[in-house]
Image (cartoon, rainbow, N blue to C red):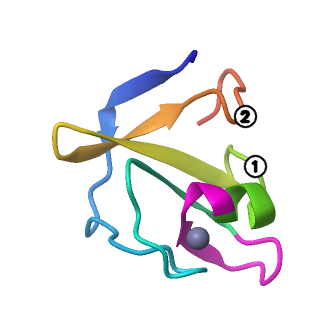
Amino acid sequence: MNKKLIKNKPWIGTIPEKCQLCGEPIEKQFVDGRDILTGHWAIMCINCFINRGSGLGVGRGQLYELEDDTYYKVFGDIAPEPGLE
Ligand SMILES: [Zn+2]
């Protein structure tokens, strides 16, 4: 596991409870990203991100991970790319 929480990038919206694509509960991680099937942005679980996401990065998606009751943006082992922002 090679990932890093970006502590100054907390999720500031309503904490998502369900994946907007499949309706499964969001657990430790979610992606705010573009759905390749519809072209729309959605809060998606990791399974949907793998199946339907556009990757991570500007205009594609942002990965968030829960720590201490707050979701923080994290760039991690799913699609590591330096310098995203
Ligand atoms: Zn899902």
The quarter of the displayed image where residue 21 is located: bottom right
Characterize the local packing of mark 2: few (<14), some (14-19) or many (20 or more) Cα atoms within 10 angstroms. Answer: few
Q: Let me know if residue 39 is in the magenta part.
A: yes
Farthest residue to the right: give it.
37
Residue 19 location in percent, x, y?
49, 73
First along the sequence among labels 1 and 2: 1
Q: Which secondary structure lies at badge 2?
A: loop
Front-lying residue, 41 or 29: 29
Instruction: State the extent of the magenta-drawn residues as a range.
Output: 35-47
Q: Residue at x 60, y 55 (%)?
A: 46
Is the residue under label 2 in contact with that under label 1 (CB below 8 Å)?
A: yes
Q: Which residue is mark 1?
A: 55
- Cβ of mark 1 under 8 Å from ligand 1: the answer is no
- The image shows residue 79 at horizontal and vertical percentages of 72, 34
Q: Which mark is residue 79?
A: 2
State the CA–CA distance, disc 1 to disc 2. Answer: 7 Å
Residue positioned most to the left = 68
Q: Is residue 73 left or right of residue 39?
A: left
Any magenta on residue 40?
yes
Query: In the figure, 79 relative to 63: above or below?
Result: above
